Amino acid sequence: MNKKINTLYFSATDTTKKIVLGIAEKLSKNMSNINHIDFTLPEARKKPVSFTKEDVVVVGVPVYAGRVPNVLLKYLNTITGNGALAIPVVVYGNRNYDDALIELKDILESNGFKVIAGGAFIGEHSFSKILAKNRPDEKDMAIVSDFAKQIYKKITTQDEIQTVIVNGNKPYRKYYMPKDKNGNPVDIRKVKPKTNSNCIDCKLCVSICPMGSIDYQDVSKFNGICIKCGACIKKCPVNAKYYDDKDYLRHKHELEIDCIERREPEIFI
Ligand SMILES: Cc1cc2nc3c(=O)[nH]c(=O)nc-3n(C[C@H](O)[C@H](O)[C@H](O)COP(=O)(O)O)c2cc1C
């Protein structure tokens, strides 16, 4: 194919990254030619990014509350497509992707991309070590591979490449909210991880927090918001970070029970 392959993704616990890179690598003959833009860390979101008609961009975000994470909207709206082909990909933790894919597609289109395919895939849930455990797995990656083949064919055989229609509601549904035991919505936005005595002060959590919120001098302190992305919990080498908020833990437990049935990726081409 006569086009440059790019990835553009946010991935706190690497499941979105795995899907996006999987698609890009299958689309590209020469893997070292892929241009990777990982905007998981705050520094990366300060750099302006623009593409041209010669580019194909695989764009991935995790699903947060059934939508594109709202903390990423400002950054996503600074990216300019200038006619580049885009493949939006959302990765969710086996509950639902609700309106995240259609929202990401709309964002890309309004920024000058031509959206030619899209997909919703499943990754281990950020809140849990058992919900969608170890996904994406081999079966998911086989679908990734087939999806990339179909995209390749579409790009190389259609004279006027058609845009795609994806699932989702318009207007978008409200951000999904966890409920308490009486069914009332609870707001877990203020919940932050605690640090236990296992901590060896290695500062890894400081360097991987996508919000740059963990204090360097005192890693048990937060200087900004926590998006519950799971990075500091899952990547800590000594399991020093944990949540003890009862509403958060109740929601996590409820998801682990209610969303146990395996969901499969959906692709749109
Ligand atoms: C704040 C927050 C909200 C989430 N909301 C949803 C959701 O609505 N539906 C769902 O199935 N998974 C949800 N998830 C789980 C993530 O979408 C999923 O684990 C994804 O694979 C994480 O991607 P990453 O590994 O690239 O960070 C949520 C995760 C977080 C942190």
Image (cartoon, grey):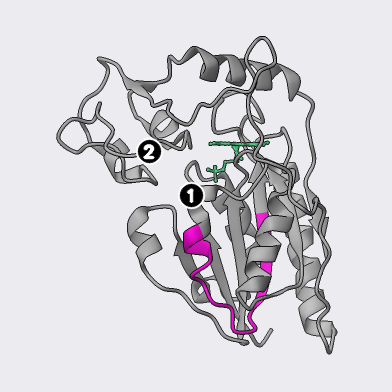
Q: Residue at x 69, y 64 (%)?
A: 106
Asked whether the viewer can see residue 20, the reply is yes
- Residue shown at the point (48%, 67%) measured from the top left: 36
Residue 87 covered by magenta stretch:
yes
* Residue 13 rendering spot, x and y as whole percentages: 49, 41
Check disc 1: other Cα within 10 Å, few if <14, some if 14-19, many if 20+: few
Q: Work out whether 197 lies above or below 143.
A: above
Q: Where on the picture, by quarter, is residue 180?
A: top right
Secondary structure beneath dot 2 equals loop
Residue 34 in percent (x, y) is at 53, 73
Question: Where's the C terminus, which quadrant?
Answer: bottom right
Residue at 50 percent of width and 54 percent of height: 72
In what quadrant of the picture does the N terminus appear?
Answer: bottom right
Toward which corner of the image does residue 260 lie, by quadrant?
top right
- In the rendered image, which residue does mark 1 sit on? 71
Per the rendered image, the range of residues in magenta is: 74-89
Residue 225: assigned label: 2
